[in-house]
Amino acid sequence: MNQGRLREQIEEAVRVLRRASDLRPQVGLILGSGLGELVDAVEGAIAVPYAEIPHFAPSTVLGHAGRLVLGHLSGRAVVVLQGRLHFYEGYTIAQTTFPVRVVRALGAHTLIVTNAAGGINPSFRVGDLMRIVDHINLLGMAGQNPLWGPNDEALGPRFVDMRGAYDPQLGQLAEEVAQSLGFSLRAGVYAQLSGPSFETPAEVRFLRAIGVDAVGMSTAAEVVVARHAGLRVLGISHISNVATEEAFSAPVSTTDPHHEVLEAGRRAIPRLAALIRGVLERLE
């Protein structure tokens, strides 16, 4: 895409949102599969469907409401993406990450990104929360990088340093909040695949071999754009299912695995909501 045109599209989206609310958010939140109910805690919420925001693609996946919500959470002005866009829905990587551009343009300086992920680390259990310490962007490494094409220096630098992409100070803060709430955060490396098919046993063994702890179909590309835009990032994965040797040898399930992910997400909401609230309360 022409980068000047991208800037125009961001400005068009922001103008529409400013008509709905003049709130200047400090923090952006991206809510993953089954986690959208967190938005119920936002005070003074103004919700705008993606379909009403210029250049936002509609969310087509169950568990992703497809709304941008402005309001306050734990005393912080926030902009919440209730549901995200995925590459497997047929969108370009640029389309899936466009909402992050708008979050930054609205004024946010910090992004908290959540997702439901499959546990690759054999020590993980369903229901664990994992702080993302790094990622492997398999789509980006294969050519689907959201920064591909001409660069607009007004939006960010040509070459983005991804060291420390997941802010260590925010990660330490999340660890402290979790401890105060009486549970421990896992910490690990997240990998983004394209989806929508889930991983084969051979693919799981490959992911373990390259150092992946959790895998999903989002997040890494969003974080690339967030860092390009200068946002600090905290990433939290909810482990919604775990790949074990027993699972490899079990009969093929007749249930929809995405429904299992959504149900696990609903069970994770109380702890994840408490964690996010605690982080917001303690942010400098």
Image: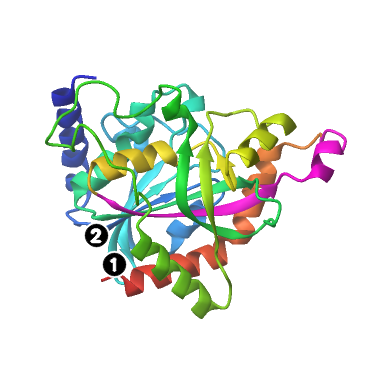
Q: Quadrant of the N terminus?
A: top left
Q: Is residue 48 in sight in this rendering?
A: yes
Q: Circle 2 — which element?
A: loop
Name the residue rendered at 27%, 46% in the picture.
103
Q: Which residue is labeled 2 in the image?
A: 26
Q: Could you tell me if the residues under marks 1 and 2 are in contact, i.e. CB atoms within 8 Å?
A: yes
Tell me the magenta residue range. 231-253
Indicate which disc, 1 or 2, sits on the residue closer to the N terminus.
Answer: 2
Q: Position of residue 54 (x, y in %)?
A: 26, 31
- Camera-side residue: 17 or 268? 268
For label 2, the crowd category at 10 Å Cα-Cα, with few meaning under 14, some 14 to 19 and many 20 or more, is: some
Considering depth in this image, is 266 or 149 the residue closer to the camera?
149
Question: Total of numbered circles in the picture?
Answer: 2
Q: Quadrant of residue 232?
A: bottom left
**Residue 229: percent from left, percent from top:** 23, 43
Give the residue displayed 76% in from the left and 46% down from the top: 244
> Residue 231: where, in percent of width, then height?
26, 50
Q: Which residue is mark 1?
A: 76
Pick the residue in front: 42 or 28: 28
User: Which amino acid type corresponds to the residue marked 1 in the rendered image?
Assistant: Arg
* In the depicted structure, whether residue 60 falls above or below residue 230: above
Q: Is residue 49 visible?
A: no
Question: Which percent across, then down, holds residue 167?
Answer: 35, 57
Q: Quadrant of the C terminus?
A: bottom left
State how far apart marks 1 and 2 are (Cα).
7 Å
Is 230 left or right of 126, judged from the image as shown?
left
Check disc 1 and report its element: helix, strand or loop: strand
Q: Amino acid at mark 2?
A: Gln
